[in-house]
Amino acid sequence: EADIYQTPRYLVIGTGKKITLECSQTMGHDKMYWYQQDPGMELHLIHYSYGVNSTEKGDLSSESTVSRIRTEHFPLTLESARPSHTSQYLCASSEYGENNYGYTFGSGTRLTVV
Amino acid sequence: AQSVAQPEDQVNVAEGNPLTVKCTYSVSGNPYLFWYVQYPNRGLQFLLKYITGDNLVKGSYGFEAEFNKSQTSFHLKKPSALVSDSALYFCAVRDNGAGNMLTFGGGTRLMVKP
């Protein structure tokens, strides 16, 4: 069973709207990540965090922002959604240090901007 | 910097036949290698990992992977494919620096036909 939860699973929203994609994990992992993935395509890292009050931009430029006020919570916000933001967004977490034996992924949020 | 290559966008195999999904990597230091599977509209699920020890690693759903240091490869294998194995497969290598982040390959779509 996954211990990382993403809501909503599906979202259809109009252009210009502000949206927040939620991601929470119950494993106490320090590190969390957001990936953007078009259907059947490669993963693109857009944000990551090493812990509370730590956020970094990933390899792919994104108009989204993230926050990490609590260890378990890593929401992603789009201030003004555009059709180009239509994609799947995957959240993941991992332990810090030598015990980092991979990531645990959430089920994803499929976003459609119309 | 580390990198992962999955040279095949798609692999087609008949049900009951053996399958191989290829992965090569580049990393400084000891490689920590992973395979993940993604079913439609889902996040990535962990299949198996190589940290150290036996070059043949067994994982979930009957999959195994062979670590070959001289060829810098970590190919995913299964002796007898099932239609339900059809999915997107990602290989990943861990950064041995302070970040311990995973670098993912571009993914390989496995199609198992009845």
Image (spheres, helix red, strand yellow):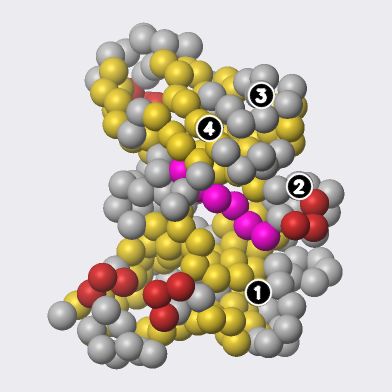
User: Which quadrant of the figure contains the N terminus of chain B?
Assistant: bottom right
Q: Magenta span covers which residues?
A: A101-106
- Mark 1 → mark 4, Cα distance in angstroms: 28 Å
Q: Which mark is residue A104?
A: none
Q: Secondary structure at mark 1?
A: strand
Q: Amino acid at mark 1?
A: Tyr
Looking at the picture, how far across and down is residue A2, in whole percent?
A: 47, 49
Q: Amino acid at mark 4?
A: Ser
Q: Which residue is mark 4?
A: A24
- Mark 3 → mark 1, Cα distance in angstroms: 32 Å
Say whether marks 3 and 2 touch (CB < 8 Å): no
State which mark lies toward you, 1 or 4: 4
Going from N to C along the chain, the mark reached first, 4 or 3, is 4
Q: Which residue is mark 1?
A: B50
Q: Which mark is residue A96?
A: 2
User: Same chain for the residues at labels 4 and 3, yes or no?
Assistant: yes
Q: Is residue A102 magenta?
A: yes
Q: Which mark is residue A70?
A: 3
Say whether marks 4 and 3 touch (CB < 8 Å): no
